[in-house]
Amino acid sequence: MDKKPFIIMVASQKGGVGKTTVAINLAAALTYQDYRVLLVDTDVDSFSIMEHLGIKGVGNGFKEIVTGKAELENSLFVYQNMDLSIILGSPADEATIFKPDQLVKFYAQLAKQNYDFIILDTKPGMFPNTIARYLNDVIIVATPDSPSIASSAKLASYCEKLKVPRRLVINRAGYSKYEMSKEDTERLFGDVTFVTVPEDKIVPESLAKQKPVYLIDRGSPFAAAIDQIARVYTLKAGDVQESGTRKRKGFFAKLIGWGAKAEAK
């Protein structure tokens, strides 16, 4: 019997903090280790995974699956540069409000998929409490300024109320002398675990090239921080290889394979 996927929601209380960048590169880090990963763009207001990865001309996405207009299995996009499965966002002509039962049905279906990890890229703000039962962990992304940290504390409190494990990722650390200190952050959040992701010039380069940092420079400070987050989840989720994951390729084999795919694109 296949093991259930470990579902990680990447969330934020405000926009512009680098949530999608973290979600994409965490998915890339786990895929690089040869785990089966599904990345889902659930933000119907600003579906940006397509733009981040240079994906164009796709059909059905998250909205169509949730509303019953498309089947999940027939709506998967495979990002061939790294064998990463994606449910992309899809344009909404007007504000889209899903019915609670539609969302519950979608997430119940996700929980049965044959992946090791499912990464959810969400729109800013609180997530519906009806889907909390399907989440194994929530990553709260913030920048190291007091408005972002303070608003993120509200999201952390919401997760605690719903009994959903959460951790804080402080993105773009080191870019300002006025950023909140580690001590101030700990005082505000209490004992919430957090990882610091440094400001890194590789990130705007990856956005311009529409490729994950992992396809450009795995040795960068940003990639090293994402690796740290990925290690947490591979340990927390257990040895998912026992659930049927294919044998992991060696380091050089992966580099050769990924390089060939990137060249072919």
Image (cartoon, rainbow, N blue to C red):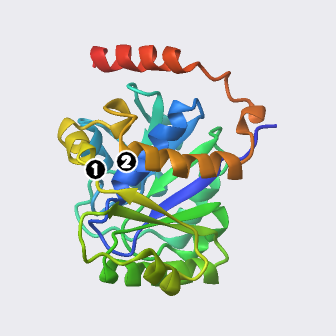
Query: Can you tell which mark lies on residue 171?
Result: none
Query: Can the viewer see residue 69?
Result: no
Q: Is residue 97 left or right of residue 127?
A: left
Tell me the SS state at disc 2.
helix
- Identity of the residue drawn at 52% across and 74% down: 128
Task: Give the residue pinned by disc 2.
Answer: 222
Q: What residue type is labelled 1?
A: Asp
Q: Do the residues labelled 2 and 1 touch (CB within 8 Å)?
A: yes
Query: Viewed as shown, does residue 121 lie left or right of 146?
Result: right
Nearer the observer, 163 or 153: 153
Left or right of 169, for residue 203: left
Q: Could you say where residue 86 lies in the image, as x and y percent from the top left? A: 44, 40
Question: Which secondary structure lies at badge 1?
Answer: loop
Residue that appears at 62% across and 80% down: 160
Location of residue 103 in the rendering, given as x and y in whole percent from the top left corner:
53, 64
Out of 17 and 186, give the one closest to the viewer.
186
Please provide percent x and percent y for residue 181.
39, 77
Residue sitting at 62 percent across and 39 percent down? 115
Q: Residues within 10 Å of mark 1 (few under 14, many from 20)?
A: some
Which numbered circle lies on residue 200?
A: 1
Quadrant the N terminus occupies = top right
Amino acid, disc 2: Phe
Residue 212 vertical position relative to residue 15 in the rendered view, above or below? above
Cα distance, mark 2 to mark 1?
A: 6 Å
- The quadrant of the image that shows the C terminus is top left
Asked if residue 190 is positioned above or below residue 53 in the image, the reply reads below
